[in-house]
Image (tube, rainbow, N blue to C red):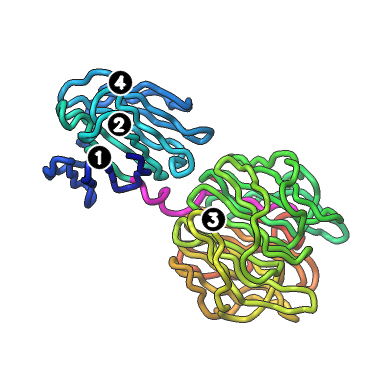
Amino acid sequence: MSGIIGSKINIRGSGRIAKLGTDGQVFTSAGAGVAANYEDVAGGISWQAVETGSTMTAVAGEGYWVNTTSNACTITLPASASVGDTIIFADYARNWGTNGIVIDSNGLNYQSDDDTFTVEYGTDGMALSITYMDATQGWVPTFDAAVADVPLGGNNNGIFGYGYAPPSNVSMSNIVSDAGVVATDVTGVGSARSALSACEYGGDKGIFGYGTTGSLTAVTNLVSSSGVIATDVTGVGTARRGSAACSYGTDKGIFGFAYQPSTAVTNLVTNVGVVGTDVTGVGTARGFVAACEYGTDKGIFGYGGVAGPTYYATTNLVTNVGVVGTDVTGVGTVRQSVGACGYGSDKGIFGFGNSVTVLAMTNLISNTGVQGSDVSGVGTARNSPGACQYGKDKGIFGYGGGAPAAVSMTNLVSNAGVVASDVTGVGTARSDSAACSYN
């Protein structure tokens, strides 16, 4: 037997399947229904330090946070057990979907199967409790559930960084507080550049990437959970400007599309901030797109343009495993150089941009990724603003150009998606900056 086990247990062997059914209802392989919940299961368990190794040996009565960020983990159960012995395992970094755990029952049965059978678990955010029943059934899962998402809302703080402040590119940044207040300039770190993009990763950190220094670049800069921007990391993938980025899967990110060169190529970002090589593009190649999250674990790229000019309202959805979908017919005014961010914990908003002239209208994205029609603009019409979440469930558009000069004003977005009027700008006026949130 070999099976990847998700949020429902599927132990296959000897022609039968045993499953954990509705939340809190446990069915053993013997068919008996037992009411259970996590609080009941966890009582009396002694929790241990985080396990990061590729192997570990479990002890009855203990709970283990298993961190598989760097590797999968094979867990050896005790060689002997008494009825009622219980052990709990929990996904420390929400990464079991990438690197799972394997249970070695060490000579005892596991849900009535002997230890020649392979038992694997591979769902992000999972908690698993097993209890020893008897020699026939052996160890039996009594609790198996995956937390569907991280706590509602996003991160508390945001950061705007980089951009073009005529006549040159810059690298300074501006922190956004959990109340949406923008701070004064922080001295720049890394290559001064513009037309870059940024997104979150790891649940509480961010990354700036790509853009132009005068020459196209793929360099990235990580943002810590306290809002500190790190020095340049050597670029991976196609150097480009006018790309977009958003998070997906609750703790990973994706860069995609570009204006120069015109492409739809994407690059995934792991939950530790490592940028992957180019993934063949899906959808219309275009640049100066925008991207944001929706539905708590998915993303969307939207709008954009190509030289000519030709403008689009097309969107492309991103699944919770980072797969970009084909073109979805656009809704609203075709335009490029749009900003986008999440709001309300599971929805998104596209705003501003240009289509011959600079614009201020917005388009809401539902928690199922449906793009709404134009909403009359509020605030100064402009293109190329940055945008990010703040205060967990609100958003902010900031900076931008073409109004007619670069600006520094901001516009707050409520947790219901309502854009507020201009707030006097703080920091260096600039366009083509990027923004992301952090905790």
Tag shown at residue 88: 2
Q: Which mark is residue 322?
A: 3
Residue 428 showing in the rendered view: no
Question: Who comes first in sequence, dot 1 or dot 3?
Answer: 1
Label 2 or label 3, whichever comes before in sequence order = 2
Residue 94, image x, y percentages: 44, 42
The residue under the point 62% across, 60% down is: 387
Q: Are marks 1 and 2 in contact (CB under 8 Å)?
A: yes
Q: Residue at x 62, y 77 (%)?
A: 313
Instruction: Let me know if residue 373 is in the magenta part.
Output: no
Q: Residue at x 33, y 25 (%)?
A: 47
Q: Position of residue 74 (x, y in %)?
A: 41, 29
Residue 306: x, y in percent? Answer: 75, 73
Any mark on residue 59, and which? Answer: 4
Give, as a single range, the part of the protein colored magenta: 146-162
Q: Residue sitting at 27 percent across and 18 percent down? A: 79
